[in-house]
Image (spheres, grey):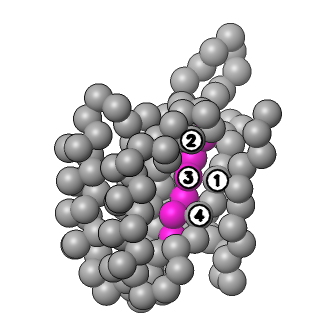
Amino acid sequence: MAKPVVVATERPLNFAAIGLMLRSRVRQGVIMGFVQIIEIETTRPDEIEALVGGWRAKTAGTRTAQRGTFTKDRDRPNTYVQIVEFPSYEAAMVNSELPETAELSRNIAALCDGPITFRNLEVRSVEEM
């Protein structure tokens, strides 16, 4: 199995505060899934959301991302976290290789006030609360 790339941050993410409920698929009784968390600092979140909307339109029928949630950190000004859900790590890598995804990444980076931080997470379990 391929090892996910993990980029450490200076400040750890507070996953409990994210309050996220993951959807995943079940295969032979085992939960499968992959989540990518992307943390950015920007004063231009509306422009980033517009870029993501354009990417969604361009990749309809080809993207493998199942769900995206764009959040604002209440404790750190101008900090946002995008939570993207995939059926598997392999599906996430297919999505990453789309030319439209590379273009989106470049365009988002241009709107950020610092480096983008990625967390690549394999889903171990999902609890409905």
Q: Residues within 10 Å of mark 3 (few under 14, many from 20)?
A: some
- Say if 78 sits above or below 70 in the image: below
Residue corresponding to mark 4: 118
Quadrant including the N terminus:
top right
Residue corresponding to mark 2: 93
- Say if 110 sits above or below 69 in the image: below
Residue corresponding to mark 1: 120
Marks 3 and 1 in Cβ contact (< 8 Å)? yes
Q: Nearer the viewer, mark 3 or mark 2?
A: 2
Marks 4 and 1 in Cβ contact (< 8 Å)? yes
Circle 3 SS class: strand
107 relative position to 102: left or right: left
Label 4 – label 1 distance at C-alpha: 6 Å
Which of the two residues, 63 or 120, is positioned nearer the viewer here? 63
Q: Residues within 10 Å of mark 1 (few under 14, many from 20)?
A: some
The three-letter amino acid code for the residue at tag 3 is: Gln
Circle 4 SS class: strand
Residue corresponding to mark 3: 36
Question: In the image, what residue occupies the spot 62% across and 38% down?
Answer: 89
Question: Residue 23: horizontal and vertical position, in percent?
Answer: 49, 34
Question: In the image, what residue occupies the spot 34% across and 32% down?
Answer: 62
Q: Which residues are magenta?
A: 34-39
